[in-house]
């Protein structure tokens, strides 16, 4: 069984979903959203970090899938989103887990067969692929799509390209972090 | 005596400087640069976080001054820089310290009397204002300028504008973090 945690970072809401695959069956074990409220930036990031650390330790997934880029309208909004994404990558690194990054087009292609699929199409397909009773929230749906995208890629034996040396260094570092 | 830690976050190098004021004298107690190398993002952010936590605990400044925005060329570079800045704000928040943000124009105005001052002018003025024997590195100089900008503002009794409620909430939260 492979269990992947999809995380969709946002400056106000971060969606997450634990997607598991056993044989040919895929299901969503748990999902949710971390809401950061309206406090100061340092305060919101501290909350995001501590909730993520607790989540990673409780769920202990095999790996984490994160979107590689945002559809930022401007450099300013990219900076704001980058704060949350940096804290997500930090929490994953501290847990000693591999963080796999997937481009938005790649994720949409994997779940809806179309790299330009709309948010509604992604939500519809995620619900269908995971046989969910109710439609998931938009942020949780994106996190589920990330998890499905990773499982899809792993099944096709299409590992993310990475130099051998970088892979070896990362493995060594994760082993240290786990100790 | 007021001791402020200026931090200039970067995706590869983060400059820092501890600037102290006693009466009318200002000096740079210590400064340095945290270099993150070329590893994976999660790995680099973990290094940045642990070095910042150690630095904050060792230096125990009264507050931290950080630049409020980057001169990002594109949304992509803003995202990359946002990662490092998010980790900096997180470490400051976890230390229970107030993070004061200053715009690049404000910093240049405070040290060089000109909001459009060049990097060379800032380095020259920082060296003069802090009576440094040697010219500081570019990243450390930016961090010193941030520290000086904060001291300048505090002396002019120009606190950063913030609602009373937000200030009260932040004070409460910092008291909690310190416990």
Image (cartoon, coloured by chain):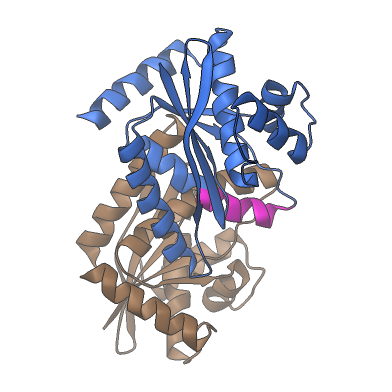
Chain colours: A brown, B blue
Q: Is residue B76 magenta?
A: yes
- Chief secondary structure of the magenta span? helix
Q: Is residue B43 visible?
A: yes
Residue A82 in view (yes/no): no
Q: Is residue B13 above or below residue A163?
A: above
Q: Position of residue A45 (x, y in %)?
A: 41, 42
The location of residue B21, given as percent across then percent down, is 48, 18
Q: Quadrant of the image for the C terminus of chain A?
A: bottom left
Q: Which residue ends up furthest to the bottom in the rendered image?
A: A157
Q: Is residue A94 left or right of residue B76?
A: left
Identified at 32% across, 61% down, the residue is A94
Q: Which residues are magenta?
A: B74-84
Residue at left 51%, top 51%?
Answer: B84
Q: Closest to the observer: A79 or A145?
A: A79
Indicate left or right for A95 with B162 as reference.
left
Q: Position of residue A171 (x, y in %)?
A: 36, 80
**Who's the residue at 24% across and 29% down the image?**
B178
Tell me if residue B92 comes above or below residue B4 in the rendering: below
Q: Horizontal placement of A98 versus A158: left or right?
A: left
- Magenta stretch encompasses residue A99: no
Task: Tell me the quarter of the image containing the N terminus of chain A.
Answer: bottom left
Q: Is residue A119 above or below residue B100?
A: below
x, y percent for residue A42: 42, 36
Which residue is at a point 57% across and 43% down the rendered structure image?
A80
């Amino acid at each position: 069984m492979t269990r992947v945690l999809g995380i969709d970072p946002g400056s106000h809401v971060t969606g997450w979903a634990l997607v598991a695959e056993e044989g040919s069956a895929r299901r969503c074990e748990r999902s949710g959203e971390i809401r950061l409220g309206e406090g100061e930036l340092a305060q919101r990031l501290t909350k995001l970090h501590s909730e993520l650390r607790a989540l990673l330790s409780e769920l202990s997934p095999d790996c984490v899938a994160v979107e590689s880029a945002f559809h930022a309208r401007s450099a300013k909004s990219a900076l704001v989103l980058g704060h949350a994404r940096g804290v997500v990558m930090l929490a994953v690194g501290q847990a000693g887990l591999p963080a796999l990054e997937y481009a938005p087009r790649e994720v949409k292609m994997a779940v809806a067969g179309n790299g330009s699929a709309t948010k509604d199409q992604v939500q519809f397909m995620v619900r269908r692929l995971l046989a969910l009773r109710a439609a998931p929230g938009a942020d949780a749906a994106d996190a589920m799509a990330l998890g499905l995208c990773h499982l899809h890629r792993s099944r096709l034996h299409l590992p993310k390209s990475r130099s051998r040396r970088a892979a070896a260094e990362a493995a060594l570092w994760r082993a240290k972090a786990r100790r």
